[in-house]
Amino acid sequence: NAGVTQTPKFQVLKTGQSMTLQCAQDMNHNSMYWYRQDPGMGLRLIYYSASEGTTDKGEVPNGYNVSRLNKREFSLRLESAAPSQTSVYFCASSEAGRGRNQPQHFGDGTRLSIL
Amino acid sequence: GQQLNQSPQSMFIQEGEDVSMNCTSSSIFNTWLWYKQDPGEGPVLLIALYKAGELTSNGRLTAQFGITRKDSFLNISASIPSDVGIYFCAGRNFGNEKLTFGTGTRLTIIP
């Protein structure tokens, strides 16, 4: 039962470097999400994709880009990493609801440090 | 951006005690969710609530969807060591893909 798989689990970057975080889900979910988690702030939505081929900005999209490569995969890219982007990044997925919101299922996170 | 207010921020209890935490919002939600996060892992769904006034249990956990739709409560009875972690509430509205998360309640069990 893989669920939502994120790679890598840990990464250290220098300021200005670029990086892509990968996420894949095997539950045939339509919707996928990227969050960041910082101490004392809970999870904040960066971008989401309601279906293959669509992406939308969340609460904190600046400095990030996303690609919904296919139904399974949703990647998050940092073009020029900044220390403020040091965080734990979580990918999630959910089934599209029909009259009832479907819960989101989360991966185990990517711990990213920008020096 | 909007965040939900969770209280308390942290709790230190002894094994066997009951736990209560709550989440409040300035706006209404159609769905309330409660997640638990263990160190080094992603949040795991505990309970989902879909109707105002709804009371739902999952083992020793009980959650309620407030009748105003602006709050939700989570109770844990007879706590055990594996209950340690951070508990997050989250709210969502129909047709909206976005979840709004609370700031979390950190539960610690004192030996």
Image (cartoon, coloured by chain):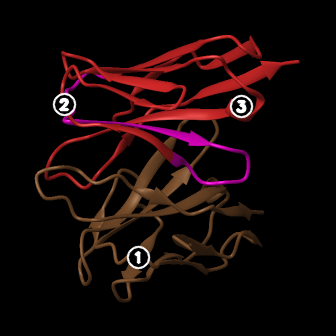
Chain colours: A brown, B red
Q: Amino acid at mark 1?
A: Val
Q: Nearer the viewer, mark 1 or mark 3?
A: 3
Q: Is residue A8 covered in magenta?
A: no
Magenta stretch, residue numbers: B25-44
Q: CA distance from mark 2 to mark 1?
A: 34 Å
Left or right, residue A107 beside residue A45: right
Q: Which badge, 2 or 3, comes first in the chain's sequence?
A: 2
The N terminus of chain B, quarter of image: top left
Q: Residue furthest right?
A: B111
Write the residue at 63% across / 63% down.
A82
Within the image, what quadrant is residue A85 found in? bottom right
Q: Amino acid at mark 2?
A: Lys
Q: Nearer the viewer, mark 2 or mark 1?
A: 2
Q: CA distance from mark 1 to mark 3?
A: 34 Å
Q: Is residue B38 covered in magenta?
A: yes
Q: Secondary structure at mark 2?
A: loop
Q: Amino acid at mark 3?
A: Val
Left or right, residue B16 beside residue B65: right
Q: Nearer the viewer, residue A93 or B57?
A: B57
Q: Position of residue B38 (x, y in %)?
A: 68, 44
Question: Does residue A7 show up?
Answer: yes
Q: CA distance from mark 2 to mark 3?
A: 28 Å
What residue would you read off at disc 2? B51
Q: Is residue B55 above or below residue A101?
A: above
Q: Is residue A35 above or below residue B84?
A: below
Residue A66: image tag: 1
What residue would you read off at disc 3? B84
Q: Which is the main secondary structure of the residues drawn in magenta?
A: loop
